[in-house]
């Protein structure tokens, strides 16, 4: 009886995968809304650094 229980519960169903993805999406949305202003600043800083590095590379500078 115990062996049969474990055999039946071996894999996840599509419903379980949908629930897991839903939770992950929910967490990402909440975190995104909470840190929205900070994320914009961070992304802006990263883009600025990439642009500066690209300019230096293209001009042959160090």
Image (cartoon, rainbow, N blue to C red):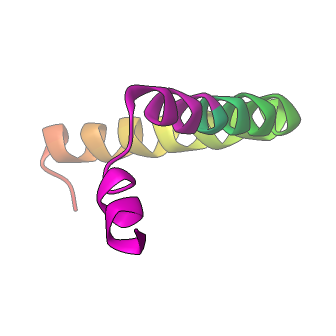
The foreground one among 18 and 57 is 18
Where does the image place residue 27, in percent across and percent down from the top left?
71, 39
Q: Is residue 25 left or right of residue 29?
A: left
- Quarter containing the C terminus: bottom left
Where does the image place residue 15, in percent across and percent down from the top left?
49, 27
Quarter occupied by residue 17: top left
In the image, residue 11 above or below residue 28: below
Residue shown at 77%/40% (left/top)? 31
The foreground one among 1 and 52 is 1
Q: Is residue 26 left or right of residue 1?
A: right
2 in magenta: yes
In the image, residue 16 above or below residue 61: above
Where does the image place residue 33, in percent across and percent down from the top left?
82, 28
In the image, residue 1 above or below residue 45: below
Residue shown at 39%/34% (left/top)? 13
Predominant SS of the magenta segment: helix
Q: Which residues are magenta?
A: 1-22
Quarter occupied by residue 12: top left
């Amino acid at each position: 009886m115990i062996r049969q229980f474990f055999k039946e519960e071996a894999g996840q169903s599509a419903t379980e995968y949908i629930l897991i993805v839903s939770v992950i999406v929910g967490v990402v949305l909440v975190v995104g809304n909470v840190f929205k202003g900070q994320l914009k600043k961070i992304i802006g800083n990263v883009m600025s650094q990439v642009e500066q590095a690209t300019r230096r590379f293209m001009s042959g500078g160090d």
